[in-house]
Amino acid sequence: MTFSASHLTTHDAPLLGVNIDHVATVRNARGGRFPDPVAAAQWAVEGGADIITFHLREDRRHIRDEDVVRLKASIGAPLNFEAAVTEEMLGIIERTRPEHVCLVPERRQEVTTEGGLDVLGQLPRVTDACVRLAAIGARVSLFIGADPAQIEAVAQAGAPCVELHTGALANAWWAGDRLAMQAELQRLQAGLKLARSLGLRTHAGHGLALSESWVAIPDVMQPASSSTALVAALPDITELHIGHALIGQAVFVGLKQAIADFKAEAVRARQAVAA
């Protein structure tokens, strides 16, 4: 099934940040230059991506330093540079001068970013990073779980934005665990309310997917109730950052159509709330 968002009104649907990391993962599996994540970013912008997100990890497992340089030189859409709070990464970000930065936790042994950044536990270090990145004109977001103490620490650190980790909700959706989904939605809603009360711009991401015929989701799930729709329907969400599932969708339908599918899902979710 394919969708187009062109005939839908947005109802202030969240912006879509397309994470291109896994295009680089495929390239690196064989070495060489193909598929090129920078070319993917160009296609994504043409397909309607509002933001291009990428994570330069310390072990360079997908995006590489030269990719970052080429992205900055080639992509007109805002770049969202995800990185750990290390001196090396802060230095690279200061030289690159992306429009947006999202500071994330990072462990070498993890397959993907799991859990949120412990802002409270390293408040002076994160505050210093926020000051440095604001000085180059970057809009800083901190990637955390929907924990009240951590959300309050984001405001204390001086970051204007927070990105709430949706991995637990996404995992509950894949498992068809409605009770867990409801609990996670309530936790996200409470976190969003607190963040907004503190003047933070609120984003979300991690693990969000669509319901499609080629995905073996449990029978108890309704196709319209994708994890993307569940989060996009939350009115305080201003940006969604999605990578793995969107690139997976592109394997079946192409990158531009995958972007249209995710954007249309977010629009429909907001329309349902407005109705």
Image (spheres, rainbow, N blue to C red):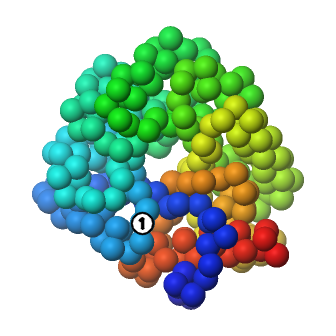
- Which residue type does callout 1 highlight? Ala
226 vs 7, left or right, is right
Where is residue 187? Give x, y as percent: 79, 42
Residue 85, relative to residue 271: is it above or below? above
Q: Residue 25's image quarter? A: bottom left
Residue occupying image coordinates x 54% and y 34%: 160
Where is residue 243? Give x, y as percent: 46, 57
Between 231 and 174, the residue placed more toward the observer is 231
Quarter occupied by the C terminus:
bottom right
Residue occupying image coordinates x 39% and y 51%: 53
Total residue callouts = 1
User: Residue most toward the left?
Assistant: 32
User: Residue most toward the right?
Assistant: 179
Between 110 and 127, the residue placed more toward the observer is 127
Quarter occupied by the N terminus:
bottom right
Between 205 and 31, the residue placed more toward the observer is 205
Per the image, the residue denoted by label 1 is 49
Residue 67 in sight: no
Residue 56, relative to residue 30: is it above or below? above
